[in-house]
Amino acid sequence: MQRRYAPSHRWRQAQSIDELAAMASKRLPAFAWEYLNAGAEDERTLNDNRRAFQRWQWRPRTLIDLSEIDSSATLLGKECAMPLAIAPTGYNGMLWRDADIALARAAQQHDIPFTLSTVSCNSLEEIAAAVPAGRLWFQLYPLRDKQATRDLIERAQVANAEALVVTTDAVVLGRREWDNRSYQNPRRLTLRHAFDAFFHPYWAAQALWPHGLPTLGNLLKYLPHGEHSAASAATYISQQMATDFTWESLAEIRQQWSGKLIVKGILNAEDARHCQRLGADAIVVTNHGGRQLDDSPASLDCLPLIVEAVGKQCEILLDSGIRRGSDIAKALALGANGVLSGRATLYGLSVGGEAGAAHALTLLHQQLRNTLALLGRPRLNQLDRSCLGPPLHIPRYFPDYPTANSVHSHIATVQPTMGDLP
């Protein structure tokens, strides 16, 4: 049966993240929708992130006291309403005016952390002023300009960011072919896409009026005098990505940053152990939402091996593919302490601003609580491997995984080896 979606102006009726995504696809012009939703090259990794969750089936228990459902969690030593933080995402201002402030406020409303990107449209200082009581994490792209990198870290400290999230998997951008389709040059739309944007007046009135495409607030002070446009900022960041960023560089950042350190971009146990030895408080298991190296493994498939390697030494967060509360529960059952979600809240933001993003978080929270109840595990600390049966299909990069047909295999005792990684 074909799924029907409510019109985009009726986003409050959306019952799932997929419905919000369908509404966003109608409201946004093609270039903005592709930026939000697309992945690298043939998008195999993008799609496999979702299939990975579908490979795992629940093993529910019954006749359990469900009078109290507790979905609260602790991330980086602080209580939050659910085990989720909003992931760092850039250029959000092309979706909604002051989008980063809207996301930060939605996160505060739901008592979870918000991660601000280096390439956000609202600056660290704007977020700190607009949402002073929110839990702010700051994501850092290390730059070629070492002084600018140090300055960004200092600004995060002044803004009272409780965690620095260092992204390691995007010093070279993946082949995002939708960019070549949408733009004649890095920030000039093709005639077809500019014409398409003209036919989205409600989006233009909200996102572009009165100053056009927003610039990147965190980078303004590093741009040449008089060149503060969105195009200038985009050119700056494309030229400034530190391709010489190494483990030694990360160790220097660890020495400079006095707060919690999260390393984002981990897909194998060896790198996870490096992060732990350098003093990281948490790592993010992620393939950058399928936007970097196509045919990388799904983040969820990499999780068990990494949990086995460092799960007792630092917190583990999972990113990429979260669309339902049951996805959050599956990540925790496989050993994660929590998850990051970027696109889910951006779909809501794109159709309803702060309230739309908050609605997306409400859906995830409600779905998580419903999953705990139906699973017969009313508290998060009851989620473990016993909640899951073996995966239905063997991930192509983990041939030793047990399958549903391997009735004599036990998921807790069969682990992929380093040799299984590409």
Image: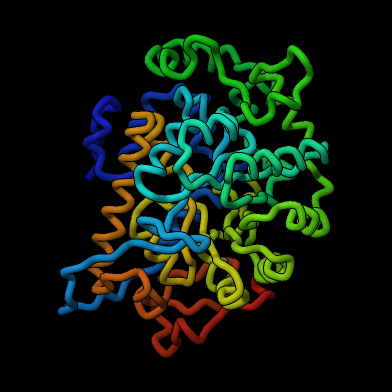
Q: What residue appears at the point 82 percent right and 36 percent down from the top-left corner?
A: 145
- Quadrant where the C terminus sits is bottom right
Q: Position of residue 191 (x, y in %)?
A: 58, 12
Above or below 301: residue 407: below
Q: Position of residue 292 (x, y in %)?
A: 64, 46
Residue 21 is at least partly visible in this image: no
In depth, the one of 235 and 56 nearer the eye is 235
- Residue at left offset 58%, top offset 46%: 161
Q: Is residue 47 left or right of residue 392?
A: right
- Left or right of 281: which side holds 106? left
Q: Quadrant of residue 172?
A: top right
Q: How many marks?
A: 0
Image point (33%, 51%), residue name: 364
Q: Is residue 385 visible?
A: yes
Task: Locate residue 376, reporting x and y percent.
Answer: 24, 73
Q: Position of residue 223 (x, y in %)?
A: 75, 23
Compared to residue 284, the image places residue 114 above or below, namely above
**Quadrant where the N terminus is found in the figure:** top left
Residue that appears at 42% across and 13% down: 205
Q: Is residue 291 above or below residue 306?
A: above
